[in-house]
Image: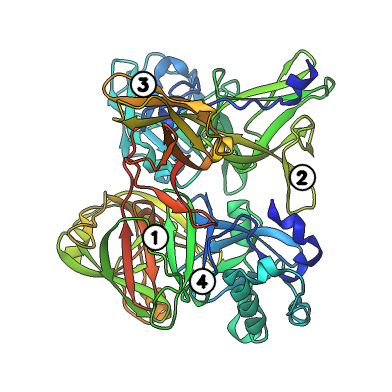
């Protein structure tokens, strides 16, 4: 529990109490899966709690339930002294600056929003959501085998500042297109090319109801379920399994739990037209490194261990 | 033996995953590997109600033509999940666990001959009052749990609370069951309360609820601050892990050293076993562990484990994950 040492200044920083700092540019943070959400522990403004890692979110969102009218406090506490360990940590520094910069315009961007419905349904103390605006400056390794996320700083061309190579074996590389903040990958459902968005914050995969009938052929519905949206509104959708999904000849997937939803509204928000969203079920089956600047996904070998 | 009772949460070890949950005596379902098997036996139920009415009837003489499982998992469909006939009175249906993973607990009931609901009794262990739009329907539903923990006499974790002998109701609730305040009722033992659970490896926070009052485990020194400025007790459920190293037949001595024993280069000696392996089985807590083998004084990475990581000093170690 490293945070005790900085107790004096903890109110002014965002801290990941469990992060391992590997070098000046690389930090490793263990996560927990709360249901299907990737959740990391953090401390901010004297509060301990959790952040959700969400590639589907454009910005850093703070939970209004815990950060009401704290803006001025944040601004005046911009610099701290004697907390070398923390300021040296690029992620924390970055977050700190980001928060300060962004809270000034928070009303415009609605980056402080009420997330209490997520707290209630997941029974977690949620401080906020970490999204694209922060993640884009790093190569992001989401490792569902070791339950950790590794953030490695990149330059504007996407080159990692950390000179060390990965120890992991990369088995395939896939290009994606960044549409605003959304990672869009060409996905093949039985060799039919579709456009899917990658979203770590999607607890379930989604297939657009309005996609062509041909694509629905490999969706086998099994039940109706209630979905609670980000607004807290409930809708009933058809859930089932999507078969024959692959990204390349090397990267293919076991049948994935998928919901049939109407993505048209979301497509407007994403600024692009999507046939579906790949969420938790997708990440669960892979170890993935995302490089936003290079618009590339790297797939890391999953170990097969005898015990 | 104060020192022993101090650590009331005993760290025992479970083989992960569902097959350890094969035994439960809850009505209406059981686990079998990665499957949930719904079982309906006519003689498990005394009363049946006609759909859309609360009138209760007996139907010992009724022949069963078909049975359907209806519940929250299939939006109470009376048609979708048809059961298979095993014999005259018994019907079964197997469903893969992935059909249930979006919630921790589910209410369900059996629907017979497209007409009757089988009514569980209030004495069944896994029932919940049936509600419709917030109104009590005066009947019970069965409840199925797919949590990270289930009650099991032979479970790998024992929760014990000393004293509170005059208490009426003691519950243990934690992150393993989304802090459900009703699920895990403890039973009275001499000098206190106890409950045995079978839990998946992992780190969990928990508290006791004694007659409605939340309290941390007084005998567990390990705890974390929660969002209310109080403390939750902390438990790490681990499991047994076997380390294997192939070859090195001429080696005199092979040592396993890792983060779990502070990299002691003498402590854990591996044994030579049949078919060309050095082997060692030991219990490890949930989480990430770093290790290396030392062969006659020479440190090596596990050649068969592709998972390796840098530490803060730039050294490379093999990694093993207990989860």
Gap between marks 2 and 3, in whole Å? 46 Å
Q: Nearer the viewer, residue B293 or B93?
A: B293
Query: Residue B280, can we see it?
Result: yes
| Chain to which mark 2 belongs | B
Name the residue carrying label 3. B272
Indicate the secondary structure of the residue bearing disc 4: loop
Instruction: Give the residue at mark 1.
Output: A279
The residue labelled by disc 4 is A131
- Marks 1 and 4 close (CB-CB < 8 Å): no
Residue A123: percent from left, percent from top: 62, 51
Q: Nearer the viewer, mark 2 or mark 3?
A: 3
Q: Could you tell whether B317 is left or right of A299 in the image?
A: right
Q: How far apart are the alpha carbons under marks 2 and 4? A: 30 Å
Residue contact at pointers 2 and 4, CB within 8 angstroms: no
Cα separation between marks 1 and 3: 45 Å
Q: Estimate the spatial distance between the alpha carbons at disc 4 and disc 3, rounded to whole Å.
A: 50 Å
Q: Which residue is mark 2?
A: B231
Tag 3 subunit: B
Asked if the residue under mark 3 is in contact with the one under mark 1, i.e. CB atoms within 8 Å, the reply is no
Q: Residue at x 43, y 78 (%)?
A: A181
Say yes or no: labels 4 and 3 on the same chain. Answer: no
Circle 1 or circle 2, nearest the eye: 2
């Amino acid at each position: 529990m490293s945070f005790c040492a900085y107790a004096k200044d903890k109110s002014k920083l965002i801290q990941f109490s469990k992060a391992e700092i590997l070098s000046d540019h690389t930090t490793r943070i263990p996560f927990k899966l709360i249901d299907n959400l990737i959740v990391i522990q953090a401390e901010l403004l004297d509060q301990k709690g959790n952040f959700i890692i969400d590639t589907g979110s454009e910005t850093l969102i703070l939970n209004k339930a815990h950060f009401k009218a704290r803006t001025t406090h944040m601004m005046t506490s911009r610099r701290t002294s004697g907390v070398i360990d923390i300021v040296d940590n690029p992620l924390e520094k970055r977050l700190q600056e980001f928060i300060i910069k962004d809270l000034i315009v928070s009303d415009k961007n609605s980056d402080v929003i009420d997330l209490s419905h997520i707290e209630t349904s997941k029974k977690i103390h949620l401080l906020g959501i970490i999204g694209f605006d922060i993640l884009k400056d790093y190569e992001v390794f989401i490792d569902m085998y070791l339950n950790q996320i590794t953030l490695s700083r990149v330059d504007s061309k996407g080159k990692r500042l950390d000179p060390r190579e990965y120890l992991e074996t990369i088995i395939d590389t896939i290009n994606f297109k960044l549409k605003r903040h959304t990672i869009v990958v060409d996905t093949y459902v039985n060799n039919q090319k579709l456009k899917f968005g990658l979203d770590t914050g999607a607890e379930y995969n989604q297939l657009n109801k309005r996609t062509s009938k041909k694509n629905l052929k490999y969706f086998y519905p099994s039940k109706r379920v209630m979905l609670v949206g980000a607004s807290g509104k409930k809708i009933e959708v058809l859930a089932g399994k999507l078969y024959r999904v692959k990204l390349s000849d090397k990267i293919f997937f076991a049948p994935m739990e998928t919901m049939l939803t109407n993505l048209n509204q979301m497509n407007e928000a994403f600024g692009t037209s999507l046939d579906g969203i790949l969420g938790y079920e997708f990440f669960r089956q892979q170890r993935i490194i995302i490089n936003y600047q290079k618009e590339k996904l790297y797939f890391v070998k999953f170990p097969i261990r005898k015990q | 033996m104060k020192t022993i009772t101090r650590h009331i949460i005993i760290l025992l070890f479970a083989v992960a995953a569902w097959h350890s949950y094969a035994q439960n005596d809850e009505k209406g379902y059981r686990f079998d590997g990665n499957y949930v098997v719904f079982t309906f036996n006519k003689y498990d139920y005394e009363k049946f109600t006609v759909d859309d009415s609360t009138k209760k009837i007996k139907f010992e003489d009724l022949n069963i033509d078909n049975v359907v499982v209806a519940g929250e998992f299939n939006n109470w469909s009376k048609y979708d999940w048809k059961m298979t006939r095993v014999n005259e009175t018994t019907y079964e249906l197997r469903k893969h666990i992935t059909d249930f993973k979006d919630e921790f607990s589910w209410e369900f009931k059996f629907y017979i001959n497209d007409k009757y609901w089988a009514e569980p009794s209030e004495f069944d262990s896994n029932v919940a009052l049936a509600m419709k739009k917030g109104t009590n329907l005066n009947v019970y539903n069965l409840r199925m749990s797919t949590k990270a923990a289930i009650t099991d006499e032979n479970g790998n974790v024992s929760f014990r609370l000393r004293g509170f002998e005059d208490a009426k109701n003691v519950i243990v609730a934690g992150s393993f069951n989304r802090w459900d305040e009703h699920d895990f009722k403890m039973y009275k033992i001499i000098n206190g309360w106890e409950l045995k659970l079978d839990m998946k490896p992992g780190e969990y926070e928990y508290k006791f609820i004694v007659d409605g009052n939340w309290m941390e485990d007084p005998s567990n020194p390990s705890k974390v601050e929660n969002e209310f400025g109080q403390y939750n007790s902390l438990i790490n459920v681990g499991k047994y892990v076997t380390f294997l190293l192939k070859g090195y037949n001429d080696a005199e001595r092979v040592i396993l050293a890792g983060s779990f024993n502070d990299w002691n280069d003498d402590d854990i000696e591996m044994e030579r076993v049949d078919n060309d392996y050095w082997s060692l089985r030991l219990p490890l807590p949930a989480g990430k562990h770093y290790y290396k083998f030392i062969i006659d004084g020479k440190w090596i990475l596990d050649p068969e484990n592709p998972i390796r990581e840098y530490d803060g000093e730039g050294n490379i170690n093999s990694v093993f994950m207990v989860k």
